[in-house]
């Protein structure tokens, strides 16, 4: 149930974002939640199968250019991910 509660809180917050004018930042926040939910769900499935897992919010370590089809900047992203994994 905790995972479902997190999803509900996210949906409520995203709905509030969409109540006003949709800015680029609001759009990015909504679109990015698919990745967040996928990561949370995968970690929950693995944990349920007694496999060690924890979800990481990619926004804390992935760095990419601002574009319609952004490319991840691996040189900037990799050190940030390594910090989280140690």
Image (cartoon, helix red, strand yellow):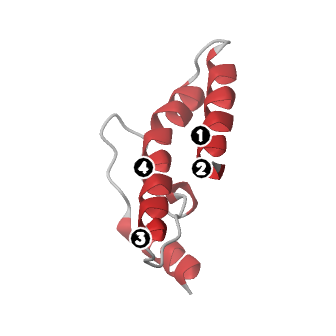
- Crowding at mark 3 (Cα within 10 Å: few <14, some 14-19, many 20+): few
Q: Which residue bears the numbered disc 3?
A: 49
| Disc number placed over residue 38 in the picture, else none | 4
Q: Which residue is mark 1?
A: 7
Evaluate whether residue 62 shows in this view: no
Upstream in the sequence, badge 3 or badge 4?
4
3 and 1 marks in contact (CB < 8 Å): no
Q: Nearer the viewer, mark 2 or mark 4?
A: 2
Give the Cα separation between the discs numbered 1 and 4. Answer: 11 Å
Q: Nearer the viewer, mark 3 or mark 1?
A: 3
Q: Going by the image, does 32 lie left or right of 1?
A: left
**Outermost residue, bottom direction?**
86
**3 vs 4, front mark:** 3
Q: How many marks?
A: 4
In contact (CB < 8 Å): disc 2 and disc 4: no
Identify the residue shown where x is 58% and y is 17%.
22
Which disc is residue 41 wearing? none
Question: Residue 31: where, in percent of width, then height?
Answer: 46, 33
What residue is drawn where x is 53% and y is 64%? 56
User: Gap between marks 2 and 3, in whole Å?
Assistant: 16 Å
- Which residue is at the front of the view, 15 or 1? 1
Percent across and percent down for residue 24 are 54, 26
Q: Residues within 10 Å of mark 2 (few under 14, many from 20)?
A: few
| Nearest the eye: 21 or 76 | 21
Q: Which residue is mark 2?
A: 3
The CA span between labels 3 and 4 is 17 Å
In terms of secondary structure, where does tag 2 sit? helix
Tell me which corner region of the image, top left, top right, bottom left or bottom right, holds residue 49. bottom left
Mark 2 and mark 3 residues within 8 Å of each other at the beta carbon: no
């Amino acid at each position: 149930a905790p995972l479902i509660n997190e999803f509900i809180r996210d949906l409520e917050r995203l709905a509030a974002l969409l109540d006003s004018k949709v800015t680029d930042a609001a759009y990015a926040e909504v679109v990015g939640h698919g990745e967040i939910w996928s990561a949370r769900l995968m970690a929950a499935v693995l944990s349920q199968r007694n496999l060690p897992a924890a979800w990481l919010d990619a926004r804390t370590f992935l760095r990419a250019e601002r574009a319609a089809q952004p490319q991840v900047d691996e040189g900037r992203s990799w050190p940030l991910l390594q910090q989280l994994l140690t």
